Amino acid sequence: MVGIQASTSYWGENNWGEYVGVELIKELTPNRTYYVEYWIQRATCINPKMDIDVIMNPNFGILFYTDTLRTSNHKMLIGDPQIKADTPLLVTDEEWLKVSKYFTPKYRYNKICIGQFWKEDKNPMIMTGYYLIDDVLIEELKDFGKFDKDAKLPIGTIIPLNHVQFVTGSVKLSNQESYTQLKELVSYLNLNPSVRIRVKGHTDSIGIKKSNLTLSKERAKFIAKYVIEAGIDKDRIEWEGYGDNHPIGDNKTEEGRAVNRRVEFEVIGW
């Protein structure tokens, strides 16, 4: 557990803040999805002007980054945290609040910073006070069955259909478990009737590149057709194949090729 002062102008300074940061043991992998959460509670402050409950604003949270962070003229770090509260939360000194989100990075982030950030393009709301941060969790989502089906996933989130397996070189499913997972996908789409997705097919680098691209498209199309025939509106479903163009593992190893042979879906709208 750590404590940080979000911001203050009560000690003769204008809007400065404290932060806590760390370099990750393992960098994030682009196009994989991670579940991230932390807990926050306000701490009692000796200054009565700061010892008040406040609404958490969208500038407070966890920022993933790779290089160095710049400081604004207001002595606050510039950035837009990826992990922040989606709805207004009243932060008090009476209970811990959980802030969580699914996050699909586009870059190989290897550092995090927690605190209140400054946006250059606007004058943001400023939280004041002293806050306790605890139980920060960053966990890769490797199984379709593990994510919260009630959560409103951010646009761009990629969810693996890790149990959907095809017969080598074909669009025929290889086992009953594959059908079970497709039924789970249909259930998810019925539970969230406004979500729109793009089914994405991928292969490893073994074989002819053009053939792999065609195969990945056909497999994505097969899944899209399955859910549409199960009653999902076709306007909610897109599909595309990428062949070996978007690997998430090392194609030089069997383990890497295995994770590259995959199908997944991306949230493209609500």
Image (tube, helix red, strand yellow):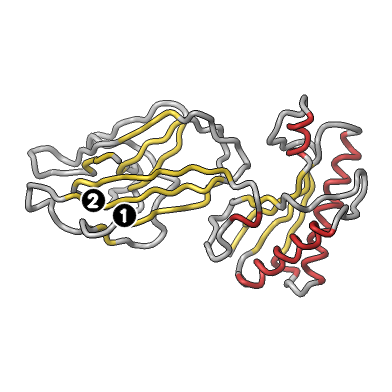
* Residue depicted at x 77% and y 62%: 180
Q: Is residue 257 above or below residue 34?
A: above
Is 65 positioned to the left or the right of 216 in the image? Answer: left
Which class describes the residues within 10 Å of circle 1: few (<14), some (14-19), or many (20+)? Answer: some
Q: Quadrant of the C terminus?
A: bottom right
The three-letter amino acid code for the residue at tag 1 is Asn
Residue 75, image x, y percentages: 23, 34
157 left or right of 160?
Answer: left
The CA span between labels 1 and 2 is: 7 Å
10 Å neighbourhood of mark 2: few (<14), some, or many (≥20)? many
The answer to whether the residues at label 1 and label 2 have Cβ atoms under 8 Å apart is yes
Q: Amino acid at mark 2?
A: Met
Q: Is residue 82 left or right of residue 244?
A: left
The residue carrying mark 2 is: 127
Residue at the image point whose x is 83% and y is 46% from the top: 216
Q: Position of residue 69 (x, y in %)?
A: 37, 30
Q: Which residue is mark 1?
A: 57
Is 160 left, or right, of 101 in this rendering? right
Q: Is residue 35 above or below residue 186?
A: above
Q: Quadrant of residue 262?
A: top right
Q: Quadrant of the N terminus?
A: top left
Q: Residue at x 59, y 51 (%)?
A: 156
User: SS class of the residue under badge 1?
Assistant: loop
Residue at x 73% of width, y 72% of height = 233
Q: Is residue 214 above or below residue 177?
A: above
At which x and y percent is residue 175?
A: 86, 55
Dot 2 lies on which element?
loop
Q: Which mark is residue 239?
A: none
Q: Nearer the viewer, residue 183 or 229?
A: 183
Compare residues 40 and 77 and report the one nearer the observer.
Answer: 40
Q: Quadrant of residue 90?
A: bottom left
